[in-house]
Image (tube, grey):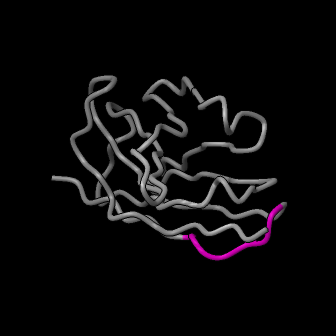
Amino acid sequence: QVQLVESGGGLVQAGGSLRLSCAASRRTFGSYHSDWFRQAPGKEREFVASITHNTNINYADSVKGRFTISRDNAKNTIYLQMNSLKPEDTAVYYCAQGVFVGIYDYWGQGTQVTVSS
């Protein structure tokens, strides 16, 4: 079993930055892909970014050029650096991990990001 704990959310003005963290309870990056999702009020959860065990990275079109996913193997932590934030980025952000692409074995509890205009 793996526990994922997100942190770093908060309230920020449009144009500002936040860095989210997702700490895993044990070493997983050697075999798991790690993804960020978000869910805004009244909307379905959507993919934001992913990093595979061999460091292939993908982003949703809506965040390309503004968000950066990374990981620190020594800390068992993945990060989501979010720059040039927009009000439409407001959502609860979740991290997830799985062995197979598109299948998620573990989810975090989420962290709220609110971007004011």
Residue 15, quarter of the rendered image: bottom right
Q: Is residue 99 left or right of residue 23?
A: left
Q: Is residue 83 above or below residue 64?
A: below
Q: Is residue 57 left or right of residue 77?
A: right
- Nearer to me, 38 or 32: 38
Q: Is residue 72 left or right of residue 19?
A: left
Where residue 18 sits in the image (x, y, percent)? Answer: 69, 64
Where residue 46 sits in the image (x, y, percent)? Answer: 45, 40
Residue 108, quarter of the rendered image: bottom left
Residue 13 lies in the magenta-colored region: yes
Q: Residue at x 78, y 36 (%)?
A: 65
Residue 67, quarter of the rendered image: top right
Magenta extent: 8-14
Q: Residue at x 29, y 60 (%)?
A: 25
Where residue 4 sits in the image (x, y, percent)? Answer: 33, 59
Q: Residue at x 45, y 46 (%)?
A: 37
Residue 23 lies in the magenta-colored region: no
- Work out which quarter of the rendered image holds the C terminus and state it: bottom right
Which residue is situated farthest in the bottom direction here?
11
Q: Is residue 62 left or right of residue 16?
A: left
Numbered circles on residues, count = 0
- Nearer to me, 55 or 37: 37
Q: Is residue 103 above or below residue 115?
A: above
Q: Residue at x 37, y 65 (%)?
A: 5
Which residue is situated farthest in the front direction here?
42
